Image (cartoon, rainbow, N blue to C red):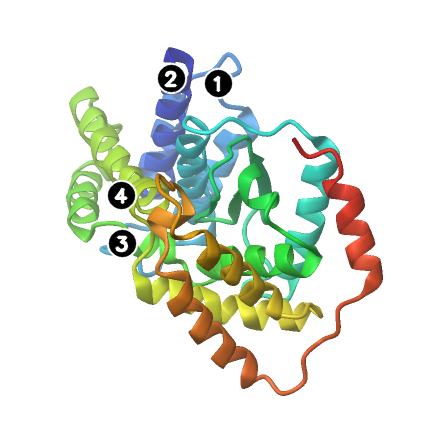
Amino acid sequence: MRKNSLIGLKVLVTSLILAVSSCAVVEKGVNMLPTGGKISEKDKRAVVKTTKALRKTFADITEEEEYYIGRTVAALILSRYPVYNHKALTSYVNYVGKAVAIYSDRPEIYAGYHFLILDSEEVNALSAPGGFVFISKGLLKRCKDEEMLASILAHEIGHVSARHGLKSIKKSRLIDAFKIIGQEVAQRYSPEKLTKLTDIFEGVLSDIAEKLIERGYDRKYEYEADKLGVKFATRTGYDPHGLADFLKIMAAEASKPGLKGWFQTHPSPQDRLARVNKEIAGLGKIPHKELVRNQRFAKAIKGLK
């Protein structure tokens, strides 16, 4: 990771530390954040505004705090994958994704949902806490229509809705962090304590990033996201067979050697396909595919390289 990226990550981690500390600590310590363009005054005010009383677990973490965690995890993802610079296509993916998010179980989250295309031929999609969703160029190339794209994004929104990213954090790290926060509740963090907290929270973020990029979520979370994806896509008016059709494509490619990304971090597509088809069969009425959507998709995807 480049030096500038490391500096930026340290700033985000510091923001996160302040975001989960008590109000007394934050009000005294917020000026420790770097200035000179590293973090805006608006961000500083947001850190102070969103902090709550000391807690023992992440069970009652606020949406503001989830956003700061997700933003920092997103920075880790973008340190590994470059962004695909295609403004029109990015706008289109956001249009579809945000439409589905409206019909999810968490339509309103702090700072809203954000969708970004990764300039990678890996077939992959990732979702960080707080509504940060990434889809690779390689995966987009395998989408056949808007129904399929919407269903894939609905699956990722399902992860956000069910807070799967937060559930991947090791509780032992959190306990250590809150012990330090509790000790410092009435004073500014000492350099030693701040360094230790930074190390702990970088570990917390690594827990999530490793899940997303290297190992993937537990099978139960993937199955739950599939179930939610079918539900959210159908609510929005999309044919949920888009997810089943995508899994068929993945099943056909699963035997190819040297596959990375999605194939390393997701359960067997055949297994998921059977479960998804069962979910769809239980829906009753299924929305029809609309011609205008396919036309819109074809126009947006044109020129994808």
Cβ atoms under marks 3 and 1 closer than 8 Å: no
Q: Secondary structure at mark 3?
A: loop
Alpha carbon of mark 3 to alpha carbon of mark 1: how far?
Answer: 29 Å
Tell me the number on the disc at residue 95: none
Q: Quadrant of residue 266?
A: bottom left
- Which residue is disc 1 drawn over? 38
Marks 3 and 1, the one that precedes in the sequence: 1
The kind of residue on which mark 3 rests is: Arg
- Which residue is disc 2 drawn over? 7
Alpha carbon of mark 4 to alpha carbon of mark 1: how far?
Answer: 25 Å
Q: Quadrant of residue 101?
A: bottom right
Q: Quadrant of the N terminus?
A: top left
Alpha carbon of mark 2 to alpha carbon of mark 4: how far?
Answer: 20 Å
Q: Secondary structure at mark 4?
A: helix
Q: Residue at x 45, y 36 (%)?
A: 74
Q: Tell which tag, 4 or 1, sits nearer the viewer.
A: 4
The kind of residue on which mark 2 rests is: Ile
Q: Tell which tag, 1 or 2, sits nearer the viewer.
A: 2
- Which residue is disc 4 drawn over? 207
Marks 3 and 2, the one that precedes in the sequence: 2
Q: Tell which tag, 2 or 4, sits nearer the viewer.
A: 4
Confirm whether residue 258 shows in the render. Answer: yes
- Which residue is disc 3 drawn over? 55
Q: Tell which tag, 4 or 3, sits nearer the viewer.
A: 4
The kind of residue on which mark 4 rests is: Asp
Marks 2 and 4, the one that precedes in the sequence: 2
Q: Position of residue 261 (x, y in %)?
A: 40, 42
Q: Position of residue 210 (x, y in %)?
A: 30, 41
Q: Tell which tag, 3 or 1, sits nearer the viewer.
A: 1
